[in-house]
Amino acid sequence: MTDVDPVEEACTRARRLMDTSAPRAEILGCLVSAAETVAGPGAVSSILVLDESGLLRNGASPNLPRDYLDAIDRLKPDPMVGTCAAAAATGAIVITPDFLADGKWAELRHLPLALGFVGAWSMAIKSTRDGRVVGTFGTYYRDVRQPTARELAAVGALAGVAARALDDSGS
């Protein structure tokens, strides 16, 4: 018996879902689940998508509560706010091992802290067509830490498939 790589499996499944014109949320949800598996117990991942107004909206966050998603809905990309807004603004990976030690979280840290999260990181999702940022792939942690090399590589692969899904859906 061989171990199945959750990232490879999710990427294959997401591509099949795209080929059948499945709903975007289902495709992105598949990718989020794989990121959570790689990150390990207690980690929660999320994909936020830039809308036509340039604001971040929920794309797939199956393990974040609705009130949290409502509170962060329509965040404007900003290099000085959180990890997802900063990643959307800069196109870079943004890592915050500890919300209490990072000024970018000053106005928002109460939201993830109330859920038991103490740190997060985000990667920009860039269009396969023109390289512009179309969303972010974020992961929240319940302990102070940075993403591992395996997590960075996994989310990089998952974000590539997410970019294709977002390109195909016209986002």
Image (cartoon, grey):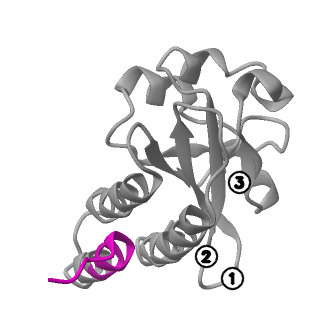
User: What's the distance in space between the residues labelled 2 and 1, CA to CA?
Assistant: 6 Å
Tell me the amino acid under the disc marked 3. Ala
**Residue at x-position 75% and y-position 51%:** 94
Q: Secondary structure at mark 3?
A: helix
Q: Is 166 left, or right, of 16 in this rendering?
A: right
Res. 51 in view = no
- Which residue in the structure is indicated by mark 3? 88
Labels 2 & 1 near each other (Cβ < 8 A): yes
Relative side of 39 to 156, left or right: left
Instruction: Find residue 78 and report its image quarter.
Output: top right
Residue closest to the eye, 143 or 95: 143
Residue 127 numbered mark, or none: 2
Mark 3 vs 2: CB contact within 8 A: no
- Image position, residue 95 (x, y; %): 73, 47
The residue located at (57%, 32%) in the rendering is 143
The one nearer the camera, 143 or 30, is 143
Give the magenta part as a residue range. 1-12
Q: For the residue marked with disc 1, what is the amino acid?
A: Asp
Instruction: Point out residue 134 in the picture as x, y percentages from the top left corner.
Output: 61, 63
Q: Which residue is mark 1?
A: 130
Vertical arrangement, residue 171 with respect to residue 58, above or below: below
Q: Is residue 78 left or right of residue 37?
A: right
Between 8 and 61, the one lying in front of the other is 8
Element type at mark 2: loop
**Pointer 3 or 1: first along the chain:** 3
Q: How many marks?
A: 3
